[in-house]
Image (cartoon, rainbow, N blue to C red):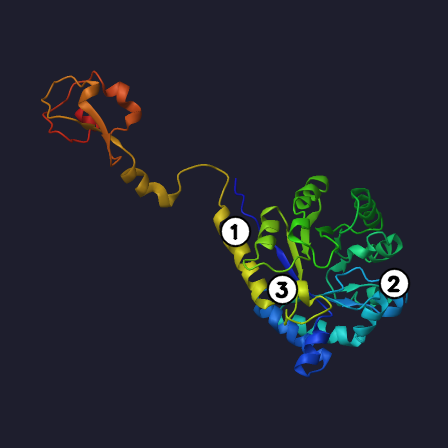
Amino acid sequence: MSTNRKQPYVIAEAGVNFYDTAKKRGVSPLEEALYYVEQAKQAGIHAIKFQSYKAETIAAKNSPAYWDLSEESTTSQYELFKKFDSFGEKEYQQLCDYCHKLGIDFMSTPFDYASADYLYDMVDIYKISSSDLSNLPFLRYIAKKQKPIILSVGASYLSEVEQAVRVMQEAGCSDISLLHCVLSYPCKNEDANLNIIKTLKEIFPNLKIGYSDHTKPDKNMAILTTAYLLGAEIIEKHFTLDKTLPGNDHYHAGDPYDFASAIHNFQLVQSVLGQSEKTVLPCEQVPRQEARRSLVLARDMKKDEMIREQDLISKRPGSGISPVYQDIVIGRKLQKDCDKDTILTWELV
């Protein structure tokens, strides 16, 4: 039985990072967002995801920060979101159209009912943030639209995940995926807790399970590769075109090179997994014969001489009688004169 695993569905979480790189490059946010789409496509990414929100509907004005203030100095969630909420339905439609033109999937996480509605005709899959996992009315509202849903489950108890899944299923969503993630920005490597991927696969065997990553990119993208090896069918990571920029999500995002490296790793893993049945592969047939051993005469012998144990030695190649049958050969007579180092065959004994 084959154990070949499909490559994971890779989502580049552009979020609102394009605002910062647009400012650095001196272009409009929309122009930069379109450039993000191009770069994601070139890196081999399957989907690029943005975030649809308005500061007024996502956070109260006195909402405190929960990220690393040494990386992002804004102390209010409201103030941070206000910096990056100028896009509306028109801009996301342009991004959606451009994604489809280039052949990459468009996604955007809705953070309010209005964006959930206008994204309906743009997205094939709704991606819901783990921050809304307990927002059951919102989950129910989106689930009733009966499109596939990917839900991140960071900072939650298993009972909360089960409740969210049940609410979505009861509302009519039959295609649900769960992404393990750690709601910490950035997530320390020792906090990544990737074994939860296996836990989710065991508890929700009928759902697709993946991983949304908040760790800083490692040189070889080993963290994402490990997630894939543990069974992640979807891989999501924040995406930027400039990892050196301070603030927002740049400091834990991957760039196109990081994503291309991870995708290369996924392809390599897929190519080496092979099958679960232990058998001799076609590429092993010749080496199997040449590298294994045969029973070989340890001295010159005459016809009708009886073969003794001391008359035999096992040597390469394996084209003669296998040492497996040594006990059967001992006591038999040679059928003709043979020189020392003759490879025995059944015709000779």
Kindly identify the residue that appears in the image at 52 percent across and 51 percent down: 269
Q: Which label lies toward us, 1 or 2? A: 2
Mark 1 Cα within 10 Å, few/some/many (few <14, many 20+)?
Answer: some
Determine contact: label 3, label 2, CB under 8 Å.
Answer: no
Kindly identify the residue that appears in the image at 72 percent across and 78 percent down: 30
Distance of label 3 from label 2 (alpha carbons): 28 Å
How far from the left and from the top, in percent, is residue 69?
76, 64
Front residue of 125/231: it is: 231
How far from the left and from the top, in percent, is residue 45?
61, 64
Q: Is residue 117 above or below residue 193?
A: below
Q: Is residue 237 left or right of residue 313?
A: right
- Residue 53, by quadrant, is bottom right
How far from the left and from the top, in percent, is residue 174?
76, 50
Mark 3 Cα within 10 Å, few/some/many (few <14, many 20+)?
Answer: many
Q: If you read the primary sequence from the N terminus, does the residue marked by circle 1 or circle 2 appear first?
A: 2
Give the labeled residue for mark 2: 63
- Residue 97, by quadrant, is bottom right
Q: Is residue 156 visible?
A: yes
Give the labeled residue for mark 1: 269
Q: If you read the primary sequence from the N terminus, does the residue marked by circle 3 or circle 1 appear first?
A: 3
Give the labeled residue for mark 3: 254
Distance of label 3 from label 1 (alpha carbons): 20 Å
Amino acid residing under circle 3: Gly
How far from the left and from the top, in percent, is residue 143?
82, 55
Determine contact: label 3, label 1, CB under 8 Å.
Answer: no
